[in-house]
Amino acid sequence: MTGERVYKGLAHVRPRPGANLKPGVTGAYVNVLVFGHDATRRSEPVAEALDDYDCELLDVGLGPLETALDDNEAVDEWREIAKDLDETKQVWCAGTFHTYSTDDDDA
C-alpha cells in the first residue's frame, strides 16, 4: 500500500438524460473521496462512479484528505468513509448533488 492515500475533491458534473435529478438541472457539484496513489490518476475512477448516477464528469479537483481535515473542511463522516476506502479501494460520492440550471448561469 506504498504511497496510497485518500483524496478529497469537488466534482463538477453534467446529468445525462434519465439522471435522477430534478427537471431543468443542467449541472451539479458533488463531494467525492477516492483512494489511490496520486490525485492525477484519480479522475477516471470518479468518472466511472458517476456513471452510476447517469452523470458525466466535467472536472474534479482533488487533494489529500489530510489537508481537508487540517483545514477543518471535512466532517467526521469522511473519516469513517476514508477508513472504508483504505480497505475497499473504492470511490465515494456524497449523497447530495448541489445542482444548478441554465437560468442560474450568468456566463
Image (cartoon, rainbow, N blue to C red):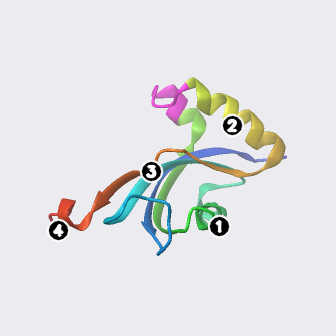
Task: First in sequence, mark 4 or 2: give its number.
Answer: 2
Considering the numbered disc 1 on the image, is that residue within a helix, a strand or a loop? helix
Residue 97, numbered label: 3
Q: Residue at x 51, y 34 (%)?
A: 68
Gap in Å between the C-alphas at discs 4 and 1?
A: 28 Å
Q: Amino acid at mark 1?
A: Glu
Q: CB atoms at circles 4 and 3 under 8 Å apart?
A: no
Q: Amino acid at mark 4?
A: Ala
Q: Residue at x 81, y 46 (%)?
A: 88
Task: First in sequence, mark 4 or 3: give its number.
Answer: 3
Q: Which residue is under mark 4?
A: 107
Gap in Å between the C-alphas at discs 4 and 3?
A: 21 Å
Percent coordinates x, y for residue 12 in the rendering: 42, 60
Gap in Å between the C-alphas at discs 3 and 2?
A: 20 Å
Going by the image, does 22 lie left or right of 105?
Answer: right
Q: Residue at x 20, y 59 (%)?
A: 104
Label 1 crowd bin: few (<14), some (14–19), many (20+), radius 10 Å: some
Q: Which residue is under mark 1?
A: 48
Q: Amino acid at mark 2?
A: Ala
Q: CB atoms at circles 1 and 2 under 8 Å apart?
A: no
Considering the numbered disc 4 on the image, is that residue within a helix, a strand or a loop? loop
Read off the magenta span. Answer: 68-75
Percent coordinates x, y for residue 20 in the rendering: 50, 60
Percent coordinates x, y for residue 78 in the rendering: 60, 33
Q: Amino acid at mark 3?
A: Phe
Residue 82, numbered label: 2
Gap in Å between the C-alphas at discs 1 and 2?
A: 19 Å
Residue 69 on the magenta span: yes
